[in-house]
Image (cartoon, rainbow, N blue to C red):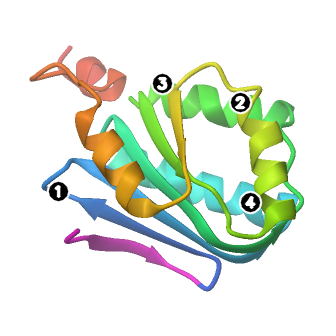
Amino acid sequence: MQLLALVDDPGIYIGYDAVNQWLYVDWKGEHTQDSSQAACLLMLENLRQYPCHKILNDNSSITRTTVQLTEWGAWWLSEMLRAGLRYIAWVFPRDFAARQASEQVLALIQKPVVGTFDDVASAYVWLQRQYVPVGAKSPEERREAF
């Protein structure tokens, strides 16, 4: 993956993969509800700046998380969908407790389509195979056309 680095903080890296036209998000270390929300806002900001329909969401480097799906999280997901997100390839944390927290959150998500994986390579292949119509525009791109 050749990535254009968009965010490179201690807790999160966000890069844009121009070849595959998706965001790669690498979560690192320990995350609380507050740090997760801050990182999610960075994801939303970058999805708006680099409109695409897919995210490879790599949680394999998370060591601990206390994340829960809240009303704020539901709002964030709706904003991500509005920005054009259709597919997330979600790589689980290696830490068992962090994985369980992720599984509980993911069980509640109906949209976008989420594929779950134990490794980045499998997530990468799955995400490449997800169909996005040629010339499909994000909602923001469609608004700008008018």
Mark 2 lies on a secondary structure that is helix
Going from N to C along the chain, the mark reached first, 2 or 4, is 4
Q: Which residue is mark 3?
A: 82
Label 4 Cα crowd, 10 Å radius (few <14 / some 14-19 / many 20+): many
The residue labelled by disc 1 is: 18
Task: Please name whichever residue, 125 or 110, is drawn nearer the observer in this view of the structure.
Answer: 125
For image coordinates 33% across by 34% down, the residue present is 53
- Judging depth in this view, the residue of 93 and 110 nearest the camera is 93
Mark 1, other Cα within 10 Å: few <14 / some 14–19 / many ≥20: some
The magenta stretch is: 1-9
Q: Residue at x 29, y 19 (%)?
A: 143
* Above or below for 43 versus 79: below
Give the residue at mark 4. Answer: 36
Looking at the image, is 78 positioned above or below residue 96?
Answer: above
Local secondary structure at mark 3 = helix
N-terminal of the pair, mark 4 or mark 3, is 4
Q: Give the amino acid at mark 1.
A: Ala
User: Along the horizontal axis of the image, is 9 left or right of 11?
Assistant: left
Residue under circle 2?
A: 75
- Observer-side mark, 1 or 3, equals 1
